[in-house]
Every structure is written in structure tokens, then in C-alpha cells.
């Protein structure tokens, strides 16, 4: 099978798929993904609020920094290759029927399907792939420029052949990165600015087109019956709904009531209290609405209170550790989350990349040989967030926190923590949605017991997004979705260059040579053992420096849906598989109608409802399809998600 990191002396060969370390599950003659039903019927409608709550949208361009893009736009655009959701990082031919990595790994060439078409019938050519690369790198969100910095050129060898050339030594993931880039029409954008927000439906080559929008309220995608790639192996049995609607809601309670009334079909519940107490309504008792928990084998993500080290008063790791000691997760989980969650300990939670205990011999050798200073704590047993007594006010831990603050020069005078200049220690938690107040309030109480001037700052969503872009906050909640094969996206999350980039994902402002060096080791890993060692070492350094107060996770998805859908027997390991593999079941729908299920609410009525997730904060921009994408597109999906969707609780 093809390996991206080509061994010296190996011959380049055209293959139907790529992966980081050469592992491909599916042979060249595969018929369909194992998690898709090739006989699934097409038809019917599907509606949801997205994988988290989103308040509004004002643009149909989700590849730039400006604006708040609608959910689901990724279904409009095909890429050269598409991920398999049951493999860690493999991609298989879509617009490109095959790919060929050069002997030295410094370029990759893709050979396009002659049948590839945009939705207006015009052909997809190599020049469109070249234009897309150049537009994303020079005019797209700054993250694209960072992620594509080592991709030097894209060249149309002929109308059906495109070659990308790389530089540097860290090229392992670059073929996967460019393979997953969305492809735009060069002709279409010749008369339209790529780098501006717009509500004009863009021209794409994917399985859906935009049908209609109500700005900030809903967007409807219509399946393209003439979709050129509908019978390719990567699509057989997928994209079955005739229409997919994303509804937008303004408040959690009304959003839940909207679901009960049949305003939309499926809801993923991120709020423990709601899942425990509110999913016993009549339609569930009557079997009209199904309630399920789907397993989640993906890394559970990096969620927590991220501490902005650009603030002078928050630069000392001892101050940041004190903030960690003040958060009583055990009390929060029992009293607010109904015991449904586990404490997040690692930046790579629920994955093999999570560090544990003392460093292994390989980890220690790597850390000691980096050539840059490494925090002392990274060479000891890995840092774990505290286990509290569950009282909500663990005196022992608060005493420890007080000692750390004293040592950092923040002493108590007249009940307030001040420095040697008499300046108070202030901590403001930035948020935009009231739901998270019940988590923040007891935490702030403990911070105040330490003498910290702590409070919440509630702003509207637009102001919240702008303040994140400008890094104008002390502490905020964030969640980064991690990949099974971490790579270049780590530069955006934790790299020094990203700390100085407007709108970057490095909210903590991490500028640490050891972190930078370890990120490069992760990207350069030539096999999974090297990848695991480097990732665990990185995890140790990040945790030793206390850049966050880790939150919680659960390795599952809680969903509820009106019982009018069917699905394959096999769920993809690394995805929900709902949007692209489920199908509308006419018999079930007829039974629902016969059983006098609540009528479908009107679109205008539905938009009066709202939903937000437990964190009360948007995800990094993007949707399920983009999450699955490897390399850069995954990162941007992740950005899109962080920008717009609520955090998974």
C-alpha cells in the first residue's frame, strides 16, 4: 500500500488512496465503504440544528476570516480525495481517481476523473485545483496560509493532472493536506471576490447545492440528482437525503421545545441536565422519538478554560496552576452534570497519544535531547488535575493554590490578592451564553476565596467572536478537536507563530520553544511509534505549563431523533455517520403519521427556538464532513467549529 513518507529508493506509483504511514484498508477495486449501505434508497428530508448550538449566520463563505458562515457548506465542495471514517487518516479518490507521491516525497501528483463536473455542468479541471490552492493560501483564513506554508506550488501539468511541490523536511502529511482541500471553480470566481462574505450560493461540485436560505434562521441544501460522483465507491450508499436543513435557534429551552414539537428531526444533546431530565416526553414514551447513545472512538478533544498568557498577570505558571486547583470538577460533575462525565486530563484525551505516569525511556530521551529548555515537570510523572473532596470548596486544595499565588508574588492584603505594586489580581471569564453561568459561578466563588477579583463577562455573540480574534480576554472556554493522526494543525493550536496571528486558534498565547520543537517532531514522525512518543512528550510539556483548566469529556454522542430514518448495520468508527449514511424510511414515516405524530413545525416557527451546548461557546468552524478531512481542511473545519458551534459537554 502507498505510504506518504516514501522510503528512500522506493518507486513512485499511482494509487487509489493515500495514508500517513501506508495503511489502506480498502483495495483498489473496493465497491463502497463498509459503513455505507450501497442499496440505501434516496429521498426524503432531514433537519437538525447541527452538532452543537449555533446562533446565526451571515455568510455562505466558510473559508475566510470574515463573517459567520452557515453550517453544512462543506457538502457543496468535493476534494481530490475523501477520508474513510473507519481509518485513522486514509483518503481515497474522489475528484482525483489516483495519486502518486514522488520518490523523495517532495511532491504529489493527482490524476483527475474526466467525468468530474461542477453543479452547473462545467468540467472540474486541474486549473481549478490550482486556483483553489492559491486562493486559500493567499486570500483564505490565515490558518490556510500557515498550514500550506511548506506547499510551494500547485501546477496544472495538463487539464486532468495537478502536481503540488513541497519544501522542507516535514512533508509527511502534505499530500493528505492538499488532497483534502475543497475545489472551487476558477471561472466562477473570476467575477466574484473570493475573500468577501456573501449570501450568494457558491458553485461547487459536491453532492448538494444550496436550495434556499433565511439569513440567520435556516439554510436548506438540496441533493443534486446529477451529481457526477454519486456512483463512485467513496459515495455509494452515502448522501441519501433529498434535502438537509440546518435550523438556527436563539435559546436552549425553546430549542428543546421545538424538537418536541417536531420542528426538526434530530438533536444531539450536549447538556447533561437536559439529557437526564427532559428526554422523557410523550413522543419518547410512545416510541415516536428514539433516544440513543452512540460510541465515539475519536480523540475526545481538548476542552477547558484556556488562560490567556498574553496578559502579564497570567504569565506565571504558578498563577495558572492555582486557577486549576480552584476548580472542583467532582462537585460540578455530581451536582450539575449528573455524573455523566469524566475529567479531562490530557490534550490528547481518549487516544493513544495521551501521556501517563513517568516518561517512557523513549519520551525521556526525546525531551532531554530537544536542544531547548524543557519544564522540569515534563520529566516527572505527568501532571494530573486535582481530585477534590467533592465539597465544592476543597480547603486543602485552596490552601495549595494560595501558596502558589504567594510564591508568584500575589499576596493577600485586606482580603485581596495584589502584587508588589498594589495591583489586584483580576480574572475575567469571557462568555456569551447564560447557560454556562451555573458552571462558572461556583468556580468564581472559589477564586474569590483566594482573594482574586474574579467575575464573568457576558457579551453578545458577535462581540465575543471579535474579542477572541483580538485575544481580548483573560479566560475563555474552548475545545479543539484532535485527529487520530495529529499533525500540522498543532502549529495552529499551540505554536509560537500562531500566538501572534490575528484570529488564530492559539488562544492561550503559547510561545514555548520546547512546544514548537515537539510539534515538529510529531509532524515529522515516520511511523506510529514515533508519532505516539512525540505526542506524549508534547502532552507532558503542555500539561506541565498549566495553560488551561481542563474540563470534562464523554466518549459518546447522545442523540434523539424522530423515528423515520434507517441506517447501516455498521457505524463508522470515527464519525457519527448520520448525515451521510442514514436514509429516510418511508414505512417508518408512514407509521409515524398514522400514529398522529406532532405535525412538522413551520420553518418560521422553528426559527423562534434556540439551542446551545453546555459550554455556551462556539466550536471551531466546520461540520462533520470537514472534521473527517485530513490535514489542513480538518484544521479549518476545526477553526470553523471553534468559531461557531457550542462546545461538546
Image: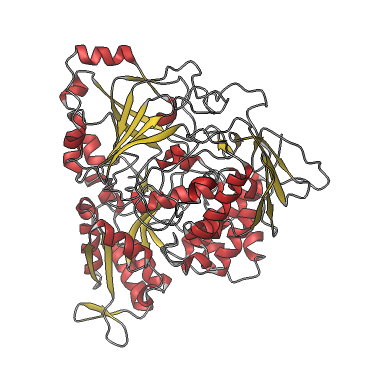
Examine the rendered structure and indicate whether residue 334 appears above or below residue 145: above
Picture residue at 65% right of the left edge, 60% below the top = 366
Residue 491 visible, this orientation: no
Q: Position of residue 411 (x, y in %)?
A: 29, 80
Q: Is residue 330 visible?
A: yes
The residue closer to the viewer here, 78 or 356, is 78
Report the side of 296 relative to 352 (left or right).
left
Question: Which residue lies at the image location 67% right of the left edge and 65% below the top edge?
Answer: 369
* Quadrant of residue 115 within the rendered picture: top right
Residue furthest to the front in view is: 191
Residue 524 rendering spot, x and y as whole percentages: 66, 54
Q: Is residue 373 above or below residue 553?
A: below
Q: Nearer the viewer, residue 419 or 105?
A: 105
Q: Name, please, the residue furthest toward the right.
A: 9
In the figure, 1 relative to 336: above or below? above
Residue 18 quadrant: top right
The structure residue drawn at horizontal position 43% and vertical position 39%, both measured from the top left corner, is 624
The image position of residue 584, as x and y in percent, is 35, 20
Residue at 20 percent of width and 28 percent of height: 262
Task: Please give the count of numbered marks on the rendered protein.
Answer: 0
Closest to the observer: 410 or 462?
462
| Nearest the eye: 310 or 566 | 566
Is residue 102 toward the left or the right of residue 51 in the image?
right
Specify the quadrant that holds the N terminus: top right
Taking the view exactly as shown, the residue that stands out farthest to the bottom is 421
Q: Could you say where residue 603 lies in the image, as x and y percent from the top left?
A: 21, 34
Q: Quadrant of the C terminus?
A: top left
Amino acid at each position: 500500500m502507498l505510504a506518504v513518507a516514501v522510503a528512500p529508493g522506493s518507486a513512485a506509483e499511482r494509487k487509489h488512496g493515500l495514508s500517513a504511514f501506508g495503511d489502506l484498508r480498502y483495495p483498489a477495486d473496493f465497491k463502497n465503504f463498509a459503513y455505507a449501505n450501497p442499496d440505501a434508497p434516496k429521498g426524503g428530508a432531514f433537519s437538525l440544528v447541527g452538532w452543537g448550538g449555533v446562533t446565526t449566520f451571515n455568510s455562505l463563505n466558510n473559508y475566510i476570516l470574515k463573517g459567520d458562515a452557515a453550517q453544512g457548506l462543506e457538502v457543496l465542495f468535493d476534494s481530490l480525495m475523501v477520508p474513510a471514517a473507519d481509518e485513522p487518516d486514509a483518503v481515497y479518490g474522489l475528484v482525483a481517481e489516483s495519486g502518486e507521491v514522488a520518490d523523495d516525497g517532495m511532491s504529489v501528483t493527482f490524476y483527475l476523473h474526466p467525468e468530474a463536473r461542477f453543479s452547473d455542468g462545467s468540467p472540474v479541471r486541474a486549473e481549478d485545483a490550482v486556483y483553489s490552492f492559491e486562493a486559500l493560501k493567499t486570500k483564505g483564513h490565515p490558518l490556510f496560509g500557515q498550514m500550506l506554508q511548506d506547499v510551494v506550488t500547485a501546477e496544472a501539468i495538463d487539464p486532468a493532472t495537478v502536481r503540488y511541490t513541497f519544501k522542507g523536511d516535514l512533508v509527511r502529511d502534505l499530500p493528505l493536506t492538499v488532497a483534502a482541500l475543497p475545489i472551487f471553480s476558477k471561472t466562477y470566481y473570476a467575477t466574484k471576490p473570493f475573500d468577501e462574505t456573501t449570501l450568494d450560493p457558491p458553485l461547487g461540485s459536491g453532492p448538494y447545492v444550496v436550495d434556499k436560505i433565511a439569513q440567520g434562521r435556516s439554510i436548506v441544501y438540496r441533493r443534486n440528482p446529477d451529481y457526477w460522483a454519486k456512483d463512485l465507491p467513496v459515495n455509494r450508499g452515502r448522501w441519501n437525503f433529498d434535502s438537509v436543513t440546518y435550523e438556527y435557534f436563539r435559546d436552549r429551552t425553546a430549542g428543546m421545545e421545538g424538537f418536541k414539537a417536531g420542528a426538526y428531526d434530530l438533536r444531539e444533546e450536549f447538556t447533561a441536565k437536559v439529557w437526564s431530565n427532559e428526554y422523557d416526553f410523550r413522543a419518547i414514551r410512545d416510541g415516536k422519538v428514539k433516544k440513543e447513545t452512540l460510541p465515539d472512538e475519536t480523540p475526545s478533544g481538548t476542552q477547558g478554560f484556556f488562560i490567556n498568557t498574553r496578559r502579564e498577570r497570567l504569565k506565571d505558571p504558578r498563577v495558572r496552576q492555582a486557577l486549576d486547583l480552584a476548580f472542583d470538577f467532582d462537585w460540578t460533575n455530581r451536582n450539575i452534570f449528573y455524573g455523566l462525565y469524566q475529567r479531562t486530563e490530557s490534550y490528547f484525551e481518549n487516544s493513544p497519544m495521551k501521556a501517563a505516569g513517568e516518561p517512557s525511556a523513549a519520551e525521556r530521551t526525546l525531551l532531554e535531547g530537544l536542544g531547548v529548555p524543557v519544564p522540569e515537570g515534563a520529566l516527572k510523572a505527568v501532571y494530573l488535575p486535582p481530585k477534590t473532596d467533592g465539597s465544592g470548596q476543597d480547603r486543602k486544595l485552596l490552601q495549595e493554590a494560595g501558596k502558589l499565588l504567594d510564591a508568584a508574588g500575589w499576596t493577600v492584603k485586606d482580603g485581596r490578592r495584589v502584587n508588589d505594586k498594589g495591583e489586584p489580581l483580576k480574572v475575567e471569564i469571557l462568555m456569551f451564553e447564560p447557560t454556562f453561568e451555573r458552571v462558572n459561578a461556583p468556580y468564581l466563588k472559589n477564586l474569590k476565596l483566594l482573594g482574586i477579583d474574579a467575575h464573568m463577562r457576558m457579551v453578545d455573540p458577535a462581540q465575543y467572536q471579535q474579542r477572541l480574534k483580538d485575544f481580548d480576554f483573560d479566560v475563555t472556554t474552548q475545545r479543539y478537536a484532535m485527529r487520530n493522526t495529529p499533525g500540522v494543525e498543532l502549529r495552529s493550536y499551540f505554536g509560537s507563530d500562531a500566538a501572534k496571528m490575528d484570529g488564530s486558534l492559539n488562544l492561550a498565547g503559547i510561545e514555548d520553544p520546547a512546544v514548537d520543537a515537539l510539534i515538529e517532531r510529531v509532524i515529522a514522525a515516520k511511523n506510529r511509534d514515533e508519532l505516539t512518543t512525540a505526542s506524549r512528550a508534547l502532552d507532558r510539556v503542555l500539561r506541565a505549563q498549566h495553560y488551561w483548566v481542563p474540563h470534562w469529556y464523554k466518549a459518546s454522542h447522545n442523540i434523539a431523533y424522530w423515528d423515520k430514518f434507517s441506517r447501516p448495520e455498521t457505524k463508522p468508527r470515527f464519525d457519527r455517520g448520520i448525515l451521510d449514511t442514514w436514509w429516510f424510511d418511508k414505512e417508518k414515516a408512514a407509521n409515524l403519521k398514522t400514529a398522529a405524530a406532532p405535525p412538522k413545525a413551520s420553518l418560521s416557527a422553528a426559527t423562534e427556538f434556540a439551542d446551545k451546548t453546555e459550554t455556551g461557546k462556539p466550536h471551531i468552524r466546520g461540520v462533520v464532513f470537514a472534521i473527517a478531512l485530513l490535514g489542513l481542511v480538518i484544521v479549518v473545519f476545526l477553526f470553523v467549529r471553534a468559531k461557531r458551534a457550542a462546545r461538546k459537554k
